[in-house]
């Protein structure tokens, strides 16, 4: 029974918090801080609420606010850019609205300040979001004549949560950059190996073809004078050709197709040099060469479109498995709207359909563009031990 419950719980968790974020159950444990919203009710029960907060406590606004908070909370983990900011501000607004009937509604402001560290942009901008939300809380506390400790507690905890999240995200970003650097080194090593193989093939084929031409010319001269010797020379030509074919096959065995990791490195350099904050979630998996090549080319084309056309501030790339398919998401928060036919979409679609895959593009004016590529995976790939291991590198897209 437990064997069937655990996968169901993980699927349910994945629908609320993307597994690629690598946060596990932590966001659910953080919901425990909602219990502070019921402290005024407890104080009223023991007869202390009138003395501390003047008796201003109503339970029903708190219950309604929790019902509104939960969808915003889980949505904030899944959004980037302006949409994430909107979730953050909506959570802060809940705190302002409920504060007159519940002095501990400042809990919502602490959640909002935690998300402020993750909305992207420079540190000063994120600090400004937090300062603005806390300033609004201070004004309301003064107007409601609540004790000053309500604001001081909020200030201390909110700042601690903000910088805790900021430090966590910076550490993840450095780990991600280090991993991409390693991938780039491997890519450069592969390029050097291809050049070496090219030189070896040139030397091998040059020598072999010269020898074949010489033996063939000699056999032609011996056909009339010594047929047996001509046959021996032709047999030698056949042997040389077969040996050369085997050497060529051996030489090209190490050549690999274009890799997703190297394209991620290139995408990061291209977008960040253009001022676009780059988020990525990469589930390492054993992809067949043809699948990895088409996904890498799709990623390259989509990122080029973002850099040239989107006018985006944030972009996210996510690669993971879904059922028996590899799924690549590329989304941005740019201008969106009509997709120009010259942006390489037809080439992406043709390459994916050749492998039985499909391409979906959603682009709403003012809300950015989302490109999703799905490619079926062979059964052997799905059974590989590392195909489902999800260990990601997440710049500031996570909370």
Image (tube, grey):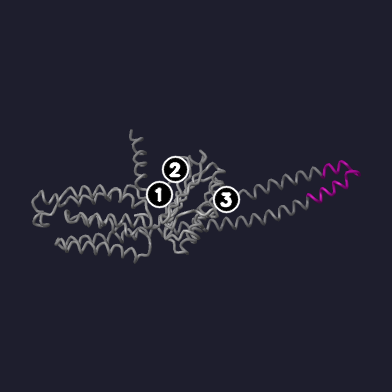
Relative placement, left or right, of 368 versus 32 is right
Q: Quadrant of the N terminus?
A: top left
Q: Which residue is mark 1?
A: 20
Q: Which residue is mark 2?
A: 322
Magenta span? 212-233
Relative placement, left or right, of 311 versus 75 is right
Secondary structure predominantly adopted by residues drawn in magenta: helix
Residue 88 spot, x, y in % from top left: 31, 56
Question: Which element carries disc 2, helix, strand or loop?
Answer: strand
Question: Which residue is farthest right?
Answer: 225
The nearer-to-camera label among 2 and 3 is 2
Q: Which numbered disc, 2 or 3, marks the residue that appears first in the sequence?
A: 3
What residue is shown at x 44% (from left), y 58% (from top)? 335
Q: Which residue is mark 3?
A: 257
Residue 103 spot, x, y in % from top left: 17, 56
Q: Tell me, yes or no, if residue 289 can be seen here.
A: no
Q: Which numbered disc, 1 or 2, marks the residue that appears first in the sequence?
A: 1
Q: CA distance from mark 1 to mark 2?
A: 12 Å
Question: Which element carries disc 3, helix, strand or loop?
Answer: loop
The answer to whether residue 223 is magenta is: yes
Give neighbour class at mark 2: few <14, some 14-19, many 20+ (Cα, 10 Å).
Answer: few
Q: CA distance from mark 3 to mark 1?
A: 25 Å
| Label drawn at residue 268 | none
Residue 188 spot, x, y in % from top left: 56, 58
Residue 153 spot, x, y in % from top left: 20, 60
Q: Which numbered disc, 3 or 1, marks the residue that appears first in the sequence?
A: 1
Question: Which element carries disc 1, helix, strand or loop?
Answer: helix
Q: Tell me, yes or no, if residue 177 can be seen here.
A: yes
Question: Which residue is farthest top?
Answer: 1
Q: Are marks 1 and 2 in contact (CB under 8 Å)?
A: no
Q: Quadrant of the C terminus?
A: bottom left
């Amino acid at each position: 029974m437990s064997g069937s419950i655990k996968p169901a719980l993980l699927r349910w968790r994945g629908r609320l918090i993307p597994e690629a974020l690598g946060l596990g159950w932590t966001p659910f444990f953080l919901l425990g801080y909602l219990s502070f919203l019921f402290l005024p009710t407890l104080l009223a029960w023991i007869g202390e609420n009138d003395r501390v907060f003047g008796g201003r406590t109503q339970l029903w606004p708190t219950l309604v606010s929790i019902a509104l908070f939960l969808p915003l909370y889980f949505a904030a983990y899944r959004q980037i850019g302006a949409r994430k900011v909107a979730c953050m501000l909506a959570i802060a607004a809940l705190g302002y609205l409920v504060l007159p009937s519940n002095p501990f509604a400042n809990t919502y402001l602490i959640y909002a300040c935690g998300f402020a560290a993750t909305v992207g942009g420079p540190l000063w901008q994120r600090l400004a979001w937090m300062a603005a939300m806390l300033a609004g809380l201070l004004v309301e506390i003064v107007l409601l004549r609540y004790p000053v400790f309500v604001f001081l507690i909020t200030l201390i905890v909110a700042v601690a949560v903000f910088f805790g999240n900021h430090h966590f995200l910076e550490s993840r970003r450095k780990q991600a950059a280090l991993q991409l650097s390693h991938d780039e080194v491997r890519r450069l090593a592969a390029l050097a190996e291809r050049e070496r193989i090219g030189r070896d093939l040139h030397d091998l084929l040059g020598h072999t073809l010269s020898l074949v031409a010489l033996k063939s010319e000699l056999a032609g001269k011996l056909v009339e004078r010594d047929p047996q010797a001509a046959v021996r020379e032709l047999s030698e030509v056949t042997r040389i050709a077969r040996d050369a074919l085997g050497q060529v096959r051996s030489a090209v065995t190490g050549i690999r197709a274009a890799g997703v990791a190297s394209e991620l490195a290139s995408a990061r350099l291209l977008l960040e040099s253009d001022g676009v904050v780059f988020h990525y979630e990469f589930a390492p998996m054993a992809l067949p060469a043809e699948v990895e090549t088409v996904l890498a080319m799709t990623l390259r084309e989509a990122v080029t479109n973002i850099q040239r056309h989107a006018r985006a501030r944030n972009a996210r790339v996510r690669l993971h498995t879904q059922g028996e398919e590899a799924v690549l998401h590329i989304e941005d928060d740019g201008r969106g709207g009509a997709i120009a036919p010259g942006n390489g979409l037809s080439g992406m679609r043709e390459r994916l359909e050749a492998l039985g895959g499909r391409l979906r593009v959603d682009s709403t004016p003012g809300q950015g563009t989302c490109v999703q590529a799905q490619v079926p995976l062979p059964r052997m790939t799905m059974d590989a031990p590392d195909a489902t291991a999800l260990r990601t590198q997440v710049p500031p897209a996570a909370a």
